[in-house]
């Protein structure tokens, strides 16, 4: 099995805050942020693209005590704004898009 390198960038230098991730020779891009930093995530170019996203939050009745909502959108930022208003359970978001607009 060949190893792969994952490049993480802590946007403000703090673990647990807005983070970007890329894998060498992969066309995807991952953003992760706490709900409290959603506004910062929405300002990023990647959030304006088509992609998939996960909303994560604590749930004592769920397996692993984590509730996960998985969605997709043509413009991820628009859908996340909707979920900010309509879904209360989540406290972290993960967004998966391509590195460019293709």
Image: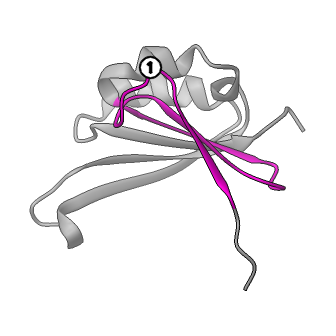
Please state the extent of the stretch shown in magenta in the rendering.
5-34
Say few, some or many: other residues with alpha carbon within 10 Å of mark 1 (under 14 / 14 to 19 / 20 or more): few
- The spot of residue 88 in percent (x, y) is 23, 34
Q: Quadrant of residue 14?
A: top left
Q: Tell whether 61 sits left or right of 15.
A: left
Q: Quadrant of residue 20?
A: top right
Colour mapping used in the image: one colour
Q: Tell whether 67 sits left or right of 41.
A: left
- Farthest right residue in view: 102
The mark tally for this picture is 1
- The spot of residue 78 in percent (x, y) is 57, 23
Tell whether position 46 is magenta: no
Q: Residue at x 40, y 31 (%)?
A: 83
Q: Residue at x 70, y 20 (%)?
A: 45
- The spot of residue 96 in percent (x, y) is 62, 45
Q: Which residue is under mark 1?
A: 12
* Quadrant in which the N terminus is drawn: bottom right
Q: Secondary structure at mark 1?
A: loop
Closer-to-camera residue (73/23): 23
């Amino acid at each position: 099995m060949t190893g792969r390198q994952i490049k993480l960038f802590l946007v403000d230098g703090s673990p647990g805050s807005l983070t970007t991730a890329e894998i060498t020779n992969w066309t995807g891009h991952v953003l992760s942020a706490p709900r409290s930093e959603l506004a910062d995530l929405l300002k990023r170019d990647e959030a304006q693209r088509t992609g998939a996203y996960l909303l994560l939050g604590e749930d004592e009745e769920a397996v692993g005590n984590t509730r996960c909502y998985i969605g997709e959108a043509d413009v991820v930022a628009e859908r996340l704004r909707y979920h900010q208003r309509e879904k209360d359970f989540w406290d972290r978001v993960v967004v998966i898009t391509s590195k460019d607009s293709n």
